[in-house]
Image (cartoon, rainbow, N blue to C red):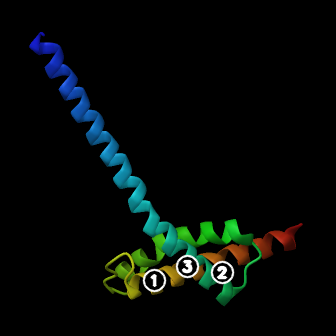
Amino acid sequence: MPVVPLVGFILVAIVAIWMLLAITHAVFSLIPILLIGLIAGWAASKLVGSRFGLLGTTVIGIVGSLIGPVLFSSLLHIYVGGRFGITNIIASVVGATLLLAIARVTENRRALHY
């Protein structure tokens, strides 16, 4: 059996396995973001009140869970560490609450203009 095709096959297999592991890691790193976003969206909807439904509130919670820790670290200089840390959850709820309040204000302004 020639050595060159065997080496090529092994290289292709290594690259394929590496890509599969990278994709799997990316997918599994999204799960905590989705869970924190779901919790933050639910808590924000209870604090502000939401008329966006489950999907809209979840999306706002996920975006808020990305915005909240950035605001905490850049504006308040509070380190938000760990995906399931209490400071991350609090910052995510604050971010989702702010985003939900902004969404409600813009929704009310649009309703007034029509």
Q: Are marks 3 and 1 in contact (CB under 8 Å)?
A: yes
Of the pair 64 and 7, the residue shown nearer to us: 7
Instruction: Identify the residue shown where x is 68% and y is 67%.
Output: 56
Q: Nearer the viewer, residue 2 or 114?
A: 2
Q: CA distance from mark 3 to mark 1?
A: 8 Å
Residue picked out by circle 2: 101
Marks 1,2: beta carbons within 8 A? no
Report the residue that reaches farthest toward the front. 1
Label 2's element? helix
Q: Which residue is mark 1?
A: 89
Q: Is residue 64 visible?
A: no
Q: Residue at x 19, y 28 (%)?
A: 11
Upstream in sequence: badge 3 or badge 2:
3
Q: Quadrant of the C terminus?
A: bottom right
Mark 1: which amino acid? Ile
The circle drawn on residue 39 is 3
The amino acid beneath tag 2 is Ala
Secondary structure at numbered mark 1: helix
Residue sitting nearer the eye, 33 or 15: 15
- Residue 18: x and y in percent read 26, 41
What separation in Å lies between label 3 and label 2 (alpha carbons)?
A: 17 Å
